[in-house]
Amino acid sequence: MTIQVRGRVIDDDSEHGLTGVSVTNGEQIVQTDGEGRYELDVETGTHRFVFITVPDGFSAQDGYYRSTPDVSEAQDGVDFRLSPSPARSRRSFTLAQITDTHIVTEGDTHTSGPVLSEALRQIEREAKPDLIIASGDLTDWGTIEQLTAFRDAVRTISTPVFPLFGGHDGNQERMGGISIDEFLELKATPNNPKLAEIGRKFAGLPATLHFEAFLGPTYYSLDWGGRHFAFFPNEDAYYPPADLERKAQWLRADLALQPPDREIVVVVHTPPPGSFLRELSRYNVRLVLHGHWHSSKVCSYGDMVVSAAPPVCFGGIDTSPRGYRVVQFSDGDAALGLRVLQAAGAAPKSGEISPRDIGFGSGSLRLRWERKIPGGIHRAAPVSSGERVFLSLRDEGWPVQAGVCCLDAASGEMVWHAGTDAAVKNSVAVDGSACAAVSITGRVQLLDAGSGATMWEADLPEYPERWIYSAPVIADGTVYAGEKAGYAAFDLASGRRIWHSVNEDGDNWACYASPQVSGDLLLLLVQRRGLVALDRATGDVVWERQAGVEFPYARPVLAGDLLVSGGGSTDLHHFSGEASFLIAVEKHSGGVVWERQILPSRYPTGLLVRDDRIYATTPEGEALCFGMDDGAMHWRFRTGDDLLDMVPYRRGVRSILAAPVMHEGSLIVCGCDGLLYVLDPASGRCLDSAAFGSPITASPCTVDRGLVVGTFDGRVFCFGWDGKDS
């Protein structure tokens, strides 16, 4: 049934009507006349809300939307009364984006309402935002209890929070009301027919009704500080076809109504594909914010900046610390940054390195130099070559300081800093005068190692939609680069692409396990697939071995004719508490030599094989030593509490993310507790340690009788043997 809804949008102070305010049924949009009046046709049973775009300088104290049943029963029209809010018309203001809160009400797998409340209060204190955007997956399963907990949490702060629907917020409805435990039990059986039956039964029904009951329309817009914000959920599987068409029609109409000089911010949940960004480029869209990947990424697409934030309540899939995005708007400009939240109970150190020398048994290392670099260091280990040290910069803001810098190994002086289009998430590859870097977007850049000058650039297929976390490799005049979705080979001299090998349909999720070259093979770890060897000349698969590997697994390591890797759980969210596997395969054939369930952890974060021993580090903060021949554990060592929550889906833990390295007969282990440990490789006894006050999440590298260590906050230290460079 179609009803005609009439009403006014009114300034609550003056009682005057507001002109030009958009009023919509979620499909068509009308605007108020000179007296603030509107008329709008609404189909009951089809249009579930009537809602407005709250204009600059106002707030909707009694809500910006009305449900269709309430509209149908209104006898005297449907009015929206807005309160003047001068702060909302200031051109300079601060926005905080949180995402993927995944609220649960039972257990502690992800997070809870009180945890979110605590994080929101901290954001209010630290960033003092004018508004907060929650960009989807607010709950883990979309139950009434979880949505209630989210709503109650955001009510504990005074800053307005604007939510967006994400797929997890509709999972229970989409799966016919079953619980998450029932779903996981069904999912445990591959190709379970009952799951398929449930999917067919509820296909074509909206999975958004729980969200709408507690938080209102799943898509809407508002104006703030001279800018227009459009919230547009883009997980289409949760909407029936008719709702999808209405949603798309609303967005086109909403954007088309904006004056040409008004900058637009679009908030979506999943990474926007190029086709969607091309459509947005028809309008004055300048910023697109999203979540879903549980990772941090900032890049440009034409005139738009596209930015993803990590989760606010637990560590990101890319091991970004739990945190939030901050956007500082000013007249005609916007600057993006990423803020991290301190780990629960972790007391930050002074930020000063321990004045003690670091002992290495037969002598000691003294500090040669210290250097602060822009952007910081995350998981990219420093690379030494000759008299130079090359560092990939952790930059998660805009305008970017991303790129690669080169330091003099003897003095620490900056030799050059080369910019890249986006952050370089892993180490560079250096071969003679060539330095290859690949950005998260999939742009491969060859730099002159002496000057930093760009020799050539080449983009991987699907640039800039790639998510590249692995390092490139240079071998025999060829650069190899890629990630789960596919690898490519480029001619070192010209940048010409020689081949591209497609592995999977996307790079999800972030994996730092970089390729290795052995003879004619390029050896890969492909998450949810296994160990794969490609022919370096053609990109063809030579052999493949299923190994149950997932995104946080360590880079496999070569040990003679063997390739040693982790292998075990492939469950994305709920890693089992059982011991996981280490596996050794023949590098030429992929044949399994041994497979042992000996690692007392969910997966290894770092591996090293030396002198018939396997050294492993884990997300439980342990360094372990196993016999290569028999798999027997020789020793285990544990670090302290993490300074930042960086382990995927975890908070308040102990962890090691950097692979161990051997230096001058000692085993070097670096922790997220901000300490570097010097261990006896035979016994695991701690010989010495030094506190850096910031997590060390990238492995150190060795230089001439010395060690280069980088910290998450962007300090680089070089230690040399006493008596040589004291």
Image: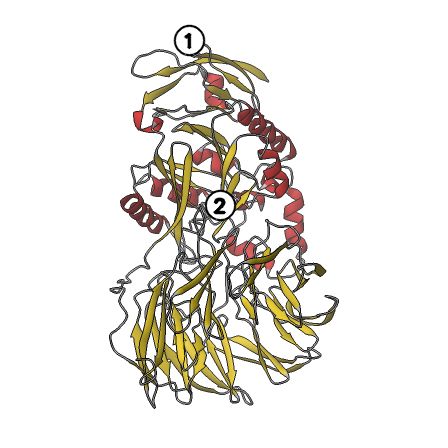
Foreground mark, 1 or 2, reads: 2
Compared with 661, 380 (above or below) is above
Foreground of the two, 401 or 113: 401
Disc 1: CA contacts within 10 A as few (<14), some (14-19) or many (>=20): some
**Which colour assignment does the render follow?**
secondary structure
Q: Position of residue 268 (x, y in %)?
A: 52, 40
Q: In this view, does 548 lie above or below 507?
A: below
Residue extending farthest to the top is 35
Which image quadrant for residue 244? top right
> If the image is split into quadrants, where does the N terminus sit?
top right
Secondary structure under badge 2? strand
Q: Which residue is found at the position 42% from the left and 78% from the top? A: 623
Q: Which mark sits nearer the N-terminus, 1 or 2?
A: 1
Report crowding for label 2: few under 14, some 14 to 19, many 20 or more residues within 10 A (C-alpha): many
Residue 35: image tag:
1
Total marks shown come to 2
C-beta proximity under 8 Å, tags 1 and 2: no
Q: Quarter-wise, where is residue 319 in the image? A: bottom left
Q: Under tag 1, what secondary structure? A: loop
User: Is residue 169 among what the camera can see?
Assistant: no
**Side of 573 relative to 155 (left or right):** right
Marks 1 and 2, how far apart at CA: 40 Å
Q: In this view, does 383 lie above or below 251?
A: below
| Residue 60 at least partly seen | yes
Where does label 2 land, which residue? 307
Q: Label 1 is placed on what type of residue? A: Glu
